[in-house]
Image: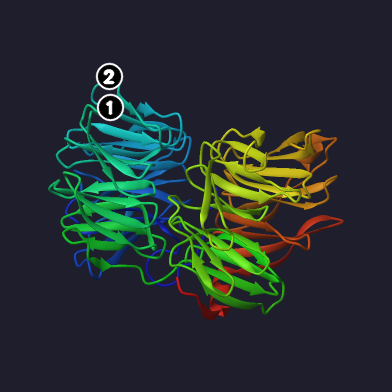
């Protein structure tokens, strides 16, 4: 497993901040990032926090937790499937004390038991495991979920609450071996939870935009309506008089214990997948280089990031330009990308992340993390808030179709962005859409399925063993999909007598050691080449032989190595494919008699520096 290598420029992180955690007295803050680092900040002066230590994992870091008994110990949880135990003194270098390495999947969250000697870790495979930290002993499994387990919170008296994408809230007592956990099941995904400081209430952040307050026995006390977008994270004030909620629209919401709204902060730079409160301060994650710090009492921002990160999330083509959309909310339009001196224009659409792009004629559409669609054709138009992030877009029959985090197809008027229709489509986030030339489109989702057809009456082509990140098509004859199950599937797309899509031969391609994030197709329907980008930093290619699946597998090779996971691909009109990685590298791939090859390479930082400043009001 190679280590993330993203050059650091200036202070803070080089990629978005995934998690924030104050220590007990609020004097130090740990921030975790996609760049594979944890930075410990001194927040003694919250208006001017300073970096005091940097810790490293081999993959992105999802969470951290300070030890309740020893204020110098910090646990960090990573997608490299390890938990690091670090000693971080107030002065002097940090040291790695131990590594909990026998995990079977990415670690999403960690929480210490009150004794400071045991740690609960929850992971993508749904497991909640208990460890003796200093000797690294696995003790027992304290819970399990049928889908990703997203967070764990431990109360002052040692009760462990876990929540997951299966909608399950479970509370267990690790000190009582064999005792059955208490359970409460919701219809929607649960991604965040936090015990009150006294341990009498559990706040649960729900995917439908509300927060429930529950007793230790998981009896319902109160439901607080927070946002039209999913509630993602929650934490309590030191005296339990109030709590703060982060929602997917980039907003933070303050409530008192009775559920009365106190304050709301809307800032699309905020990544609200994590909030932390301590001694009058609130910290929130960010899509930029540094955390956001607020006063608990009145929600004043005390400190914020000063530099954007440019990680590419989406690619599109408009005329002869390659469009790159990323975390900073800017779309970079690159002319002549395969020359040594490309011309670049920066179109500043928003100040939050762009997740998806689509084009029609001279018009650009962008789907945002904050749950809006932006239209740009020289003038700027923004849709109403749509209730969920927009990870995918496509045009179909004169309609703009947006795929959302909550599994819907949203049908918008492409000229006015008026929302015409909501269609329940998938049982999970619609990660990818791809247009079909004959009408209709392909879709891939976290419910593990790949489908094809019109808006309704769609055909399921196949399922993967885990969520599907991307789908691509070639001349309405071949479909390929990329999954977190480490595989790529490629199949023939046929038509039944009634014109509905169906599958012909299907092959499963192996090679990636980790989740496959993006996919594209080159060549012809009779002999296509599959490209796929993985979280293991590699760009793979396979030459498909429909008559010999073993031969297809044997053809697999690593075409290029990146220094971070690959993020997105785009099939260009000239037959080439543009490939982008979260390390900022963008390559152009073509095919020839000897197979695919890298033609040219760019870097997003060079593109950003070359950009002329073309301002578009957000």
Q: Position of residue 142 (x, y in %)?
A: 33, 27
Give the SS element for disc 1.
strand
Residue appearing at x 27%, y 54% in the figure: 253
Quadrant showing the C terminus? bottom left
Sort mark 2 into few (<14), some (14-19) or many (20+) by Cα contacts within 10 Å: few
Name the colour scheme.
rainbow
The earlier-in-sequence mark between 1 and 2 is 1
Residue 569, quarter of the rendered image: bottom right
Q: Nearer the viewer, residue 35 or 245?
A: 245
Residue 53: numbered disc: none
Residue 75 shows up from this direction: no
Instruction: Check contact, mark 1 vs mark 2: CB within 8 A.
Output: yes
| Left or right, 87 with reference to 60 | left
- Residue 127 percent across, percent down from the top left: 41, 31
In this picture, residue 224 sits left or right of residue 578: left
Relative to 335, does residue 301 appear above or below in the rendering?
above
Q: Which residue occupies 22% across, 61% down?
A: 299
For residue 214, what is the image quadrant? top left
Element marked by disc 2 = loop
Identified at 37% across, 66% down, the residue is 12
- Image x and y of residue 269, in percent: 39, 63
Q: Residue at x 41, y 37 (%)?
A: 189
Q: Is residue 204 left or right of residue 419?
A: left
Q: Is residue 190 visible?
A: yes
| Label 1, label 2: how far apart the Cα atoms are | 8 Å
| Residue named by callout 2 | 179
Residue with the mark numbered 1: 172
């Amino acid at each position: 497993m190679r280590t993330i290598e993203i050059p650091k420029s200036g202070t803070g992180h080089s990629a978005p901040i995934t998690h924030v955690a104050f220590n007990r007295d609020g004097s130090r803050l740990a921030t975790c990032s996609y760049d594979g680092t944890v930075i410990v900040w001194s927040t003694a002066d919250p208006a001017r926090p300073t970096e005091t230590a940097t810790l490293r994992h081999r993959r992105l870091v999802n969470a951290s937790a300070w030890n309740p008994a020893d204020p110098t110990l910090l646990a960090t949880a990573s997608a490299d499937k390890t938990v690091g135990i670090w000693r971080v003194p107030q002065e002097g270098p940090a040291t790695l004390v131990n590594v909990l390495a026998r995990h079977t999947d990415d670690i999403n969250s960690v929480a210490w038991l009150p004794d400071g000697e045991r740690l609960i870790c929850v992971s993508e495979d749904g497991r909640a495991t208990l460890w003796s930290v200093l000797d690294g002993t696995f003790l027992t499994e304290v819970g399990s979920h049928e889908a990703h387990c997203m967070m764990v919170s431990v109360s002052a008296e040692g009760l462990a609450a876990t929540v997951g994408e299966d909608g399950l809230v479970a509370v267990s007592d690790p000190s009582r071996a064999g005792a059955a956990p208490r359970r409460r099941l919701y219809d929607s995904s649960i991604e965040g939870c936090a015990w009150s400081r006294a341990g009498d209430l559990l706040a649960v952040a729900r995917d439908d935009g509300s927060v429930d307050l529950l007793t230790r026995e998981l009896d319902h006390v109160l439901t607080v309506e927070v946002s039209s977008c999913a509630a993602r994270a929650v934490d309590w004030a030191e005296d339990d008089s109030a709590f703060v909620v982060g929602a997917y629209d980039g907003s933070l919401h303050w409530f008192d214990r009775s559920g009365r709204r106190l304050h709301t902060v809307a800032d699309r730079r905020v990544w609200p997948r994590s909030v932390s409160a301590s001694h009058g301060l609130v910290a929130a994650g960010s899509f930029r280089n540094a955390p956001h710090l607020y006063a608990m009492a009145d929600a004043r921002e005390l400190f914020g990031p000063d530099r954007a990160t440019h990680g590419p999330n989406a690619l599109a083509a408009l005329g002869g330009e390659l469009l790159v959309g990323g975390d900073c909310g800017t779309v970079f339009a690159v002319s002549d990308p395969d020359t040594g001196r490309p011309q670049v224009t920066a179109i500043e659409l928003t100040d939050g992340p762009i997740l998806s792009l689509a084009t029609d004629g001279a018009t650009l559409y962008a789907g945002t993390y904050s749950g809006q669609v932006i239209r740009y054709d020289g003038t700027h138009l923004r849709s109403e808030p749509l209730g969920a992030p927009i990870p995918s877009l496509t045009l179909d029959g004169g309609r703009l179709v947006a795929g959302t985090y909550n599994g819907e197809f949203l049908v918008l008027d492409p000229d006015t962005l008026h929302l015409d229709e909501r269609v329940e489509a998938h049982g999970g986030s619609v990660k990818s859409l791809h247009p079909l030339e004959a009408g209709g489109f392909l879709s891939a989702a976290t419910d593990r399925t790949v489908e094809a057809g019109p808006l309704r009456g769609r055909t399921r082509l196949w399922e993967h063993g885990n969520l599907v990140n991307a789908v691509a098509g070639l001349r309405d004859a071949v479909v390929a999909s990329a999954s977190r199950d480490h595989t790529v599937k490629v199949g023939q797309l046929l038509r039944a007598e009634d014109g509905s899509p169906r599958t012909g031969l299907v092959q499963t391609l192996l090679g990636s050691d980790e989740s496959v994030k993006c996919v594209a197709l080159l060549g012809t329907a009779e002999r296509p080449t599959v490209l796929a980008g993985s979280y293991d930093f590699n760009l793979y290619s396979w030459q498909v032989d429909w008559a010999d699946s073993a031969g297809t597998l044997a053809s697999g090779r690593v075409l290029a190595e990146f220094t971070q996971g690959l993020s997105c691909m785009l099939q260009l009109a000239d037959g080439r494919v543009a490939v982008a990685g979260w390390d900022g590298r963008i390559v152009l791939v073509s095919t020839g008699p000897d197979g695919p090859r890298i033609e040219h390479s760019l870097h997003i930082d060079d593109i950003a520096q070359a950009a002329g400043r073309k301002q578009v009001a957000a």
